[in-house]
Image: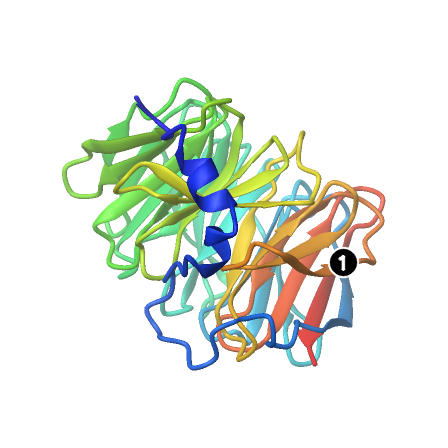
Amino acid sequence: MVKANPFSFSLFHGDMAANDAMDVDSKSSSHPHDAKSPSPNYKLRFILSGHTSSISSIKFSPDGSLLASAGPDKMIKLWDTESGDIVHTFKGHTEGINDIAWSSDGEFIASASDDKTVIIWSMELREPVKTLRGHTNVVFCVNFSPHSNMLVSGGYDETVILWDIARAKPMKVLPAHSDPVTAVTFNHDGTLIVSCAMDGLMRIWDAESGQCLKTLVDDDNPICSFVQFTPNSRFVLCSTQDSTVRLWNYQTSRCVKTYTGHVNRTYCIPNAFVTTSSKGKYVVSGSEDGRIFIWDLQSRQVVQVLEGHRDVVLAIAAHPTRNMLASASMEKDLTIKLWTDT
């Protein structure tokens, strides 16, 4: 087990941190965010209604034309991001859906369910084309590989399964964690997988061999809700249930930036990167107080807080090309909100 360097927080928490520019995106920015840069100004554009229970996952399609949403009502809904109109509703799972993911070409959606299966849905046929069976308990998280020939999933059986999509069979079953797996995804070229779990650990895996290359854990060992690679795969961004989002350099096993202000102590709330804005690069998270927090990636300052949801903001997504965010909430709200930066 690799513990966080006890000096890493003090090293990057002082005045030095604002000048310590982390390159998380493969695209170089001609507008580095500094004190003079304008703050984001997201405003509510659409309210999408149609789900009958909490919304557990929302994801923009790779081209950004559609937003997919899913939840315990067992349905996946597709929304047009230009008009806010409902496009289609998929039904087929026998229990609630915890997570959804798009293939890189936008042709398929994978969904992870309490019914212990992952279903792959065809956008062209508008129907399920494969059902992946192998988990022995709730499937909580799912993602496609960059080439969409593999799929990775994690669940309450504490395993990470790497799937061969063409054969609809597990390629590898990794005994990954000692508690339910809350998030799992590939890096940008598909050579690495990162997972996190309620055991408080983040693990980096070799996608080909299935070998665990690195284990990351914070000193206080909070439950890990969500983790993803930065766009250039040099860092991972992890959300933990001590109301903190942390940026880790996994090669040095050091936490290099922390983002706070939101409330996250109970639910698995994801984070998102905004790299499309000319104003700067941002980290975004939902919050259990019904708000959405936007931090400047480099300075770690809260640059905008969005209000409007009436319950826990359980899902968040950033548009791949436009300055648009999507957020979704729980029982007292049941809406998806689309926000655009003006």
The structure residue drawn at horizontal position 53% and vertical position 56%, both measured from the top left corner, is 272
**Residue neighbourhood size for the residue with mark 1, other residues' Cα within 10 Å, grouped as few (<14), some (14–19), many (≥20):** few
Q: Of the residues shown, which amino acid type is indicated by label 1?
A: Gly
Residue 159: image location, x then y, percent: 36, 27
Residue 283: x and y, percent?
55, 57
Q: Which residue is mark 1?
A: 50
For mark 1, give the secondary structure: loop
Q: Is residue 318 visible?
A: yes
Q: Is residue 277 above or below residue 120?
A: below
Where residue 253 appears, as percent x and y from the top left, is 31, 36
Q: Residue at x 59, y 66 (%)?
A: 67
* Rendering quarter of residue 211: top left
Rendering coords of residue 273 (x, y %)? 51, 60
Specify whether 180 is left or right of 193: right
Could you tell me which quadrant the N terminus lies in?
A: top left
**Can you tell which quarter of the image residue 209 is in?**
top left
User: Residue at the spot x=66%, y=40% of the render?
Assistant: 72
